[in-house]
Amino acid sequence: MNKDQPVKTGNSHIKSVERAILLIETLAQEDTEMSLSQLSLKLGWPKSTIHGLLATLRDYHYVDQSMENSNYRLGTRLFELGNRVARSWVIKDAARPVMLRLVREFGETVQLGTEDDGEILYLDKLVANSVVSIMSEVGLRLPMHCSGLGKVLLAQKSPAQLKRIIARKGLPAMTKRTITTQAKLEKELAQVRENGYAIDEGEIMDGLRCVAVPIWDGTGKVRYALSISGQARNIYGDRLEHIIDGLKQAAGEISYAMGSRRNEYQ
Amino acid sequence: MNKDQPVKTGNSHIKSVERAILLIETLAQEDTEMSLSQLSLKLGWPKSTIHGLLATLRDYHYVDQSMENSNYRLGTRLFELGNRVARSWVIKDAARPVMLRLVREFGETVQLGTEDDGEILYLDKLVANSVVSIMSEVGLRLPMHCSGLGKVLLAQKSPAQLKRIIARKGLPAMTKRTITTQAKLEKELAQVRENGYAIDEGEIMDGLRCVAVPIWDGTGKVRYALSISGQARNIYGDRLEHIIDGLKQAAGEISYAMGSRRNEYQ
DNA sequence: CAAATTATTCGGTATTATCGAATTAAGATT
DNA sequence: AATCTTAATTCGATAATACCGAATAATTTG
């Protein structure tokens, strides 16, 4: 019954395709237009090679070329494809209204996430008009061990799965409070399972507190998690209790909308 | 001063990269998981060829492989890249609050679009009856000649640019009211320039009426357009006048936020 | 449990991506 | 304007490597 992912980080890659991907990734990383020469310098490949790859990508709009200078940037088709992928997540539609209510009720940032290949992938985010900007963005990835969403989803993994994820991704420290040993993480996850929620206490960013709860889908599995986060000084005591209750209630509604007929949190 | 796009639909493509792209496009088109065999059948390429390409794409999450059956689907990284591209459109942040106000005021669908390679690309959309933004159609492309947004943006083009777009994309008929001749389109665009707005009168879909106005950016150019659309029977007479006024007002505000200091519509 | 379908691996071959050099284009400087 | 400088693009020979068909492994179906 163990449906571990094969994780075939195969090494028989089509070289030119891999290079094309690396070009896109480089443009995404820099988050700005880049010239052919810059790319050549950065990647250490001949200009003509890069030019050929970019020309191919450009004609499909996977990369766009500026008209004034002829710099390259990520292409509009990626926007379209991304939206196509987003559309396949039914959860987003089910979660949106509930998330909106949470924002109104608590005035804090509400986020929806899922696990993807051992990392947290943020699917949706509603921001309360607060001063602090939270470092996550929709479509961004973060490690699992240091976020509320991540810990909720990790808590569902078998020991073997957990071990594998740690082996591949490690437990990098983001702040001095980040959990960096497997033993401590296991203890924490046991706690999460018992409580039915996870708390991130400045483990990803100083002063940021985050509470997260699981969402069940129609198959009875936890594939998504919901969180509320904000400045630690705004999330404590009675208010924290209310937030946890509100989150559990909300997650229950989303789970129901997803077809889950489970009615308690374990 | 004519900054026509070079439109080098080059033909010296890196074959394997092009095939990888075609694989992604096929998966996007089908909008469902596909098996290797299906892809092989559909594209007419040997399975082993496709397998190699998919393996490369898979390891970078440009394509994901189902765990139960081993079917392929668009990968999560495309979602991330798409969001990265979306974030680069400053206009979205500037337009959002104004669009929200329009939705509340008129109770109709509000859309934001731009031109991309001779087509309309929808950047954002707010739907009337739910306060929630439906991402579902954002990221879609439509021809320019048959939508309000498109006509507003076409109205800014030089005759040469217009001719080129028509040459490349044609004037396909979507309904029986779609403008299908260059002469009629030119007349219509002159009208749009004079009015400062464009109306789509069931040219893209029967019974759908749409009003659109231009947005100026900091450089004084029209790169975006804003529209309100709904059933024709709800958008007419006095109400239509109010909508046009509201749209012009809103577009002015967005233009201002984008750095435009123009204060009249021509 | 057998049969059939499908995914994946493998190795020889010829296509084709690659690279350095040459050419063209764009921008800056005098 | 004309020259210099830098960057983008094209070209052609060569060797690398993507491609394909066949064989194997893995799944699903009867």
Image (cartoon, coloured by chain):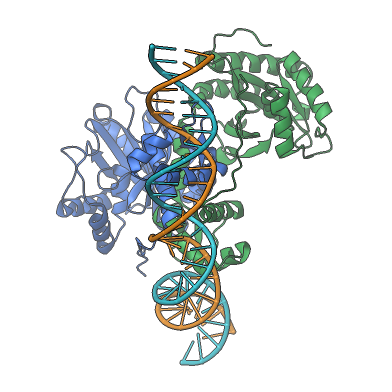
Chain colours: A blue, B green, C cyan, D orange
Residue that appears at 17% across and 47% down: A180
Nearest the viewer among B218 and B46 is B46
**Would residue A197 be found to the left or right of residue A97 on screen?**
left
The relative height of residue B10 versus residue A169 in the rendered view (above or below) is: above
**Would residue A59 be found to the left or right of residue B163 on screen?**
left
Nearest the viewer among B159 and A189 is B159
Q: Is residue A92 visible?
A: yes
**Looking at the rendering, in which quadrant would you find the C terminus of chain A?**
bottom left
The relative height of residue A200 versus residue B258 in the rendered view (above or below) is: below
**Looking at the rendering, in which quadrant would you find the N terminus of chain A?**
bottom left
- x, y percentage for residue A213? 34, 45
- x, y percentage for residue B207? 78, 34
- x, y percentage for residue A170? 22, 51
Q: Quadrant of residue A202?
A: top left
The relative height of residue A110 versus residue A214 in the rendered view (above or below) is: above
Q: Is residue A260 visible?
A: no
Nearest the viewer among C25 and A15 is C25
**Would residue A79 be found to the left or right of residue A192 on screen?**
right
Nearest the viewer among A22 and B258 is A22
In this rendering, the count of numbered labels is 0
Residue that appears at 32% across and 25% down: A132
Q: Quadrant of residue B105?
A: top right
- x, y percentage for residue A231? 27, 28
